[in-house]
Each structure stands twice: as structure tokens, then as C-alpha cells.
Image (tube, grey):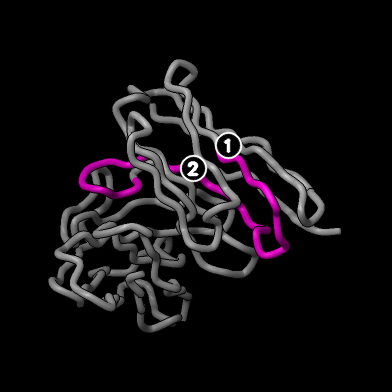
Amino acid sequence: EVQLVESGGGLVQPGRSLRLSCAASGFTFDDYAIHWVRQAPGKGLEWVSGMSWNGGSIDYADSVKGRFTISRDNAKNSLYLQMNSLRPADTALYYCAKVGGPDALDHWGQGTLVTVSS
Amino acid sequence: DIQMTQSPSSLSASVGDRVTITCRASQTITNYLNWYQHKPGKAPKLLIYGASSLQSGVPSRFSGSGSGTDYTLTISSLQPEDFATYYCQQSYTTPWTFGQGTKVEIK
């Protein structure tokens, strides 16, 4: 069974950093791209970032470009999101999701909540 | 960036009703269009990929159609478990973008 489990969320002050993790199991992790999607309170889904199976292709939403960095460790079946210079607008539930074919997010984790507030 | 516009933003329907949700892209996306169902407190669920392909395990009352810039999600006979928010999403080019969502509520 495919499982994605996010962790690392919490309450953080504006301008500080946080690192999210996504632990994967139940599939061959290094065969698939993995993405981050977030949902701010009362809002819709927003794509944040994505990384190809080998890290050769990386993309970011304009809203996080230059502040967030996605990475993966295929040996640990894990994906990460380093979030720097956090803003209140980054407050959201952050999901990691696996890309199936063609280019759809076919499995999602339950999310980890990030709250940016002083 | 490609903008995705869903309509309506919300709708009220009864069990057994046929429901249609539309999604328009700001430029052609060549069927790189996916539909998701999202319930509160749950992970989003992929329903349709590639505009019209049903994801494994999804009931056949869900169907997708469209081409170019205009796409549709249809639920042929609404069931109690279908009350949720539905999102379209384009994967034609990065940044991937979602529609604003359509909330399907009980009438």
C-alpha cells in the first residue's frame, strides 16, 4: 500500500525557517516524481513545488521561489521542503503527493500544518 | 502561468442528481487536466487524469471530458459520499495550477 507521511510542521515566527519531511513507503520511491501542495485555511489547493525522480527537474510556484528548497534522499525514501523567510501567508496544511501517469497526483499524504505567526 | 477557472464555485444538489462542473484554462493544455475530490480532514483523491481517464478504484459514475481549454467533470448520479469540494488541475506546464474549487453541498 502506498503511504506518504508528512512531518515537521509547527508554529514558527515570521522570518524564521522550517523543514518539512515526507516519508514514503509501498512503492519504488526513486521511480517517481514527488510534489508539495498546500491549502491555506479556508482556501483552495495551491501547488508549491515538485521534483523529478532523480532531482534533475525542479520547479517552484512564484510565491515561494527563492525562499523554499525541495530535495529528496532516495536512499531514505524521503522528500524534504526547506522553508526559509517564512511569512504569515505561508500558513497552510502542506501535503506531499506522488506523481502517477500521466502527470497527476495519484497518492497524497494527510498533511502537516505550518502556522507562521508572531 | 496558466489560470484555471472553475464554475460554479458551489452548488446544491440532491442524491441521484446529475452534476456537472466545468473548468476553463487560460490557454490550451492538451488534455493535461486532472480532477480531484477533497473532503475536510482527508487527503485529496485523484478521480480523473488526462481529462477523461478514470483513476483505478473510482466509481464509474464519475467521468471527465473536454479538450483544448474547456473541460468537464460529470457525476451521473450523486451519492451521499460525493458531497465534497472538487478541483481541476493542469499539468501541461509548470507551475502546475489548480482551479479555485467547486463545493458540492446537499440540497
Give neighbour class at mark 1: few <14, some 14-19, many 20+ (Cα, 10 Å): many
**Which residue is at a point 32% across and 32% down the rendered structure image?**
A32
Q: For residue A6, which numbered disc appears in the image? A: 1
Q: Hey, what amino acid is under mark 2? A: Cys
Which residue is more in the foreground, B41 or A42? A42
Q: Is residue B60 visible?
A: yes
Q: Which one is earlier in the sequence, the residue at label 2 or at label 1?
A: 1
Tag 1: amino acid: Glu
Q: Position of residue A67 (x, y in %)?
A: 60, 51
Disc 2 target residue = A96
At horizontal 65% and vertical 59% (from top left) the residue drawn is A90
Foreground of the two, B105 or A89: A89
In the displayed image of the protein, which residue is found farthest to the front?
A66
Is-magenta flag for residue B42?
Answer: no
Q: State the image coordinates of residue A107 (x, y, percent, origin top left).
A: 39, 41
Residue A59 higher or lower than B9, as above or below: above
Work out how far the residue at label 2 is from the one at label 1, CA to CA, in angstroms. 7 Å
Left or right of B13 in this view: A38 = right
Which residue appears at 57% of the width and 48% of the height? A68
Q: Is residue B7 left or right of residue A5?
A: left
Q: Chain of mark 1?
A: A
Residue closest to the far top:
A75
Q: Secondary structure at mark 2?
A: strand
Proximity of marks 2 and 1: CB atoms separated by less than 8 Å: yes
Residue at 58% in and 33% down: A21
Please provide the residue range marked out in magenta.
A81-105
Q: Secondary structure at mark 1?
A: strand
Q: Is residue B82 above or below residue A52?
A: below
